[in-house]
Image (tube, rainbow, N blue to C red):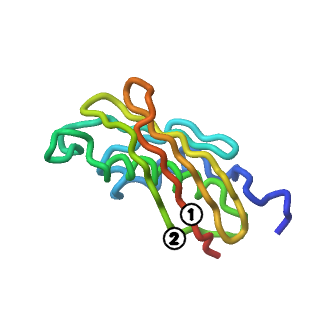
Amino acid sequence: MDESQRGKLRADRGLDWLRARQPGTLPALIGVRATALGEGTLRAELTVRPELLAPNGFLHAATVIGLADTACGYACLAHLPPAAHSFTTIELKSNFLGTATDGTIRAVARGVHLGRSTQVWDATVAGPDGRTIALFRCTQMVLY
């Protein structure tokens, strides 16, 4: 592989390509929308609705993780080395700092390490008021 292509945004994997993969998957079920894709980054959002809340009335942690993990996963797909076909998550972690009960939450995924065999992505999830509600990190194994 040409070292100059490692960790670069792939021209053949834009937002339309990512969105076309979504129907019938968990991201579609919870309502994730990828909104922007750039070198080393992806933005996504989802609208909070009652079925995404926990029984305590606040946003379910799995909803927040679903948004963050999807943003990082889509970003990983868009930044895979040319010979790679996919990835799988080998570790993830989330710290929750707040919550939401309505409105739209947004995630920004940023590449921390975009290597040939692994990628590490961080995501910050913000509530409707723009305040950070979660910090997320995942490690992806690149599949050839």
Q: Assess disc 1: are there few (<14), some (14-19) or many (≥20) residues with their C-alpha within 10 Å of its C-alpha.
A: many
Task: State the residue at coordinates (66%, 61%).
Answer: 80
Name the residue beneath numbered marker 2.
Answer: 90
Task: State the residue at coordinates (38%, 34%).
Answer: 105
Q: Is residue 94 left or right of residue 11?
A: left
Say what amino acid the circle numbered 1 marks: Thr
The tag on residue 139 is: 1
Q: Is residue 79 left or right of residue 133?
A: right
Say what amino acid the circle numbered 2 marks: Ile
Q: Nearer the viewer, residue 132 or 27?
A: 132
Q: Position of residue 7 (x, y in %)?
A: 73, 56
**Among the two numbered marks 1 and 2 on one chain, the one whose residue lies closer to the N terminus:** 2
Q: Is residue 10 above or below residue 88?
A: above
Q: Circles 1 and 2: CB distance less than 8 Å? A: yes
Q: Nearer the viewer, residue 17 or 105?
A: 105
Q: Position of residue 97 (x, y in %)?
A: 39, 40
Q: Position of residue 21 (x, y in %)?
A: 46, 56
Residue farthest to the top, as pictured: 129
Q: Assess disc 2: are there few (<14), some (14-19) or many (≥20) residues with their C-alpha within 10 Å of its C-alpha.
A: few
Task: State the residue at coordinates (34%, 56%).
Answer: 26
| Quarter of the picture holding the N terminus | bottom right
Q: Is residue 132 above or below residue 42?
A: above
Q: Position of residue 119 (x, y in %)?
A: 64, 62
Task: State the residue at coordinates (64%, 76%).
Answer: 144
Q: Is residue 129 left or right of residue 112?
A: left
